[in-house]
């Protein structure tokens, strides 16, 4: 299988300005490779940085350090944390997405349908 997403040494630290510049590390030095067609489960206690990790990959948050590479089917890649916001928005439209745990869905709609809907919209 070929790589689809690669995260190398990713870290995120928040600075709480309202608390005298206190620094909180959400996660530190996370690395993984996700192959095309595979899934990755991320687990841990509440407050251990799972959502912050996903938000860094999706670029809702800027990572403090590390690299995020998104590969195409030919093996070329884009470093997500080095591209412009406009380029990232284009990638979000067609190649990358996530569903938050707080996503408000219609009752009786399966998780599968929530994931499939944007794919069906793109044909």
Image: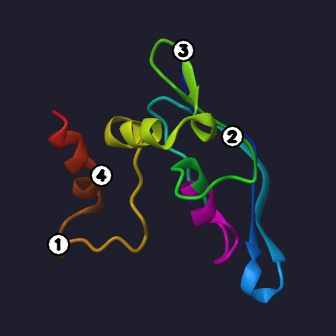
Q: In this view, does 35 lie to the left or right of 18?
A: left
Residue occupying image coordinates x 37% and y 37%: 90
**Is disc 3 in contact with disc 1, using a CB cutoff of under 8 Å?**
no
Give the mark toward the camera: 4 or 1. Answer: 4
Q: Is residue 50 magenta?
A: yes
Q: Does the magenta stretch include residue 62?
A: no
Q: Residues in magenta?
A: 44-55
* Residue picked out by circle 1: 108
Q: Which of marks 3 and 1 is nearer the N terminus?
A: 3
Q: Which of marks 4 and 1 is nearer the N terminus?
A: 1
> Rounded to the nearest whole Å, what is the CA distance between mark 2 and mark 4?
22 Å
* Residue in the foreground of this view, choosing between 75 and 36: 75
* Residue picked out by circle 2: 32
Q: Is residue 89 left or right of residue 107?
A: right
Secondary element at image label 1: loop
* Residue picked out by circle 4: 115
* Residue in the foreground of this view, choosing between 67 and 32: 67
Q: Earlier in the sequence, mark 2 or mark 4?
A: 2
Q: Earlier in the sequence, mark 2 or mark 3?
A: 2
> Rounded to the nearest whole Å, what is the CA distance between mark 3 and mark 4?
25 Å
């Amino acid at each position: 299988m070929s790589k689809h997403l690669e995260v190398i040494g990713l870290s995120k630290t928040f600075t709480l300005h309202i608390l005298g510049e206190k620094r909180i590390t959400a996660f530190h030095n996370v690395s993984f490779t996700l192959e095309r067609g595979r899934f990755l489960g991320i687990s841990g206690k509440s407050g251990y940085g799972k959502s912050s990790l996903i938000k860094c990959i999706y670029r809702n948050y800027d990572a403090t350090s590390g690299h995020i590479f998104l590969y195409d089917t030919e093996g070329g890649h884009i470093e997500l944390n080095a591209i412009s916001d406009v380029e990232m928005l284009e990638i979000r439209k067609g190649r990358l997405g996530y569903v938050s745990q707080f996503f408000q869905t219609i009752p009786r709609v399966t998780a599968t349908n929530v994931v499939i809907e944007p794919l069906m919209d793109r044909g």
